[in-house]
Amino acid sequence: MSVLEKVFYSAPGQALAKLAGLPEPVTLRRGASWPSGPLVVAGLDGATLASGTLALLGRTTSEPVLDEPGRQPAPGYGSAIGAVVVDATELRTIDALEGLRAVLRPAVRALEPSGRVVLLARPVDGVDGLEARAVAQAIDGINRTVGKELRRGATANLVQVEPGVTPAALASTLGFLLQGRSAFVDGQTWRVGAAEVPGPAVRPLDELIVVVTGAARGIGAAIARTVASQGAIVVAVDVPAAGQALSAVANEVGGTALQLDITAPGAGARITAHVAARHSGNARIHGVVHNAGITRDKLLVNTDAERWQAVLQVNLAAELRINQTLLDPAVPGGLAEGGRIVAVSSTSGLAGNKGQANYAASKAGVAGLVRALAPEVAGRGITVNAVAPGFIITEMTATIPFVQREIFQRFNSLGQGGRPVDVAETIAWFLDPASAGVTGQVVRVCGQNLVGA
Ligand SMILES: NC(=O)c1ccc[n+]([C@@H]2O[C@H](COP(=O)([O-])OP(=O)(O)OC[C@H]3O[C@@H](n4cnc5c(N)ncnc54)[C@H](O)[C@@H]3O)[C@@H](O)[C@H]2O)c1
């Protein structure tokens, strides 16, 4: 636990939380660990995608216990289960939703701490007919509700699987969700499309170049560490003023440091020149993670042009310009075909947040940019995605007044703030070559933050 986290979980913090009636946070299962109890898989209406994917991941699975209407007491599992994966990709009718309830009721009761509920279904535009489309949306409502009802660090998430997706294309996503790597991703829905992918790897980023902006501290430093642990060669970027901390991170992960203000003219060219100069042959970037960001919080009525500009330039405009350079196939040291662009949005951008009009504009803009760019570069096998962190314990959130901070960080389904590594793990999943079917998605890493849509 970092010094910052120790302060957050300190005695005064806990005492205050108790006074406010807030529950004590449980320790979440993190890292590449699988659930300890059985993985229960239910293929509704003959669906086999989930069982096929788990077989590919080398996992043994168990049969579900089904609730039976009217039976007292309701049937249950003899002991705790680790996860339930419900494959509802063939489910099309309102009546058939009963099958989902019958699987979930006993499973949710039996879920171990940090257990998982994973639902697979079709996206609304992936099925035909009014009823089937309404049902696809209904499953999203079930997921969000189960996320809010689960206890003890367990999470629920829904993957909307496009028609034609193979177990291989789904494997990185299902593995991420079941492992502790997704600890702070809860109540979320995103889609996976069909793609050709390599098989699961222990070090999926081996020898791949990943550029991380804002890498000197906080979430950026965690991203650098996480991707390096998966084999990536890290180019760590941050402002010259953070040069010492930046070098420390770069050295720690065996990468290189590039002192650069990302808003400087020609910032993209500085990155590509660094890659071309430091790496042999025709080295190209596998992934760029646009993590650098700033806040200049004030109510809109007190926000002057300077505060407005600063935030929009760092958090949004710089990203747009850097992408343009990196995406030019003629530029040496640019992004490889089949590469990855990952942006860092924020729940403040998606839901709005009092005192953050400039920040919300920039972070909602990031989400818009990701959705707009993804289809443009899909033909080159390049994916573009964003994480939207909620409350993550870093020096950025340390500036929030103590009482507000104590309340904010518990204001989600997991009752606690996230850690930088939670964001980093989600980014590493986007960067994985096996995640080629995931593009144009904005995934919140917020413990199902309760601030709203
Ligand atoms: N901490 C949270 O709860 C939270 C929540 C949502 C989103 N985010 C986002 O996550 C990202 C990282 O946040 P953090 O909490 O680690 O912040 P942080 O302030 O701890 O770190 C940000 C880093 O970006 C660098 N940076 C800022 N301006 C730069 C520039 N012009 N050029 C190069 N580097 C620059 C800083 O020097 C710093 O090292 C940001 O984009 C932030 O908006 C954070």
Image: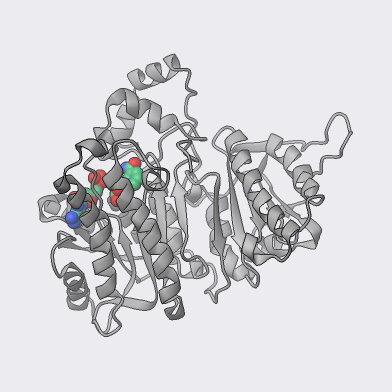
| Residue in the image at 21% along x and 60% along y | 237
Front residue (pair 190, 350): 350
| Residue in the image at 77% along x and 36% along y | 78
Q: Quadrant of the N terminus?
A: top left
Q: Is residue 308 left or right of residue 346?
A: left
Name the image quarter holding residue 193: bottom right
Residue 217 visible (yes or no): no
Q: How many marks?
A: 0
Q: Residue furthest front?
A: 301
Name the image quarter holding residue 284: bottom left
Residue 416 visible (yes or no): yes
Task: Point out residue 403 in the picture as x, y percentages from the top left corner.
Answer: 32, 23
Front residue (pair 99, 241): 99
Task: Point out residue 381 in the picture as x, y percentages from the top left corner.
Answer: 45, 77
Q: Is residue 385 left or right of residue 331?
A: right
Q: Is residue 145 left or right of residue 31?
A: right
Q: Residue furthest top?
A: 19
Task: Point out residue 26 in the picture as x, y percentages from the top left corner.
Answer: 50, 31
| Residue in the image at 27% along x and 77% along y | 334
Q: Is residue 216 above or below residue 167?
A: above
| Residue in the image at 39% along x and 20% along y | 14
Q: Is residue 139 above or below residue 267?
A: above
Task: Point out residue 19 in the picture as x, y percentages from the top left corner.
Answer: 43, 14
Front residue (pair 265, 31): 265
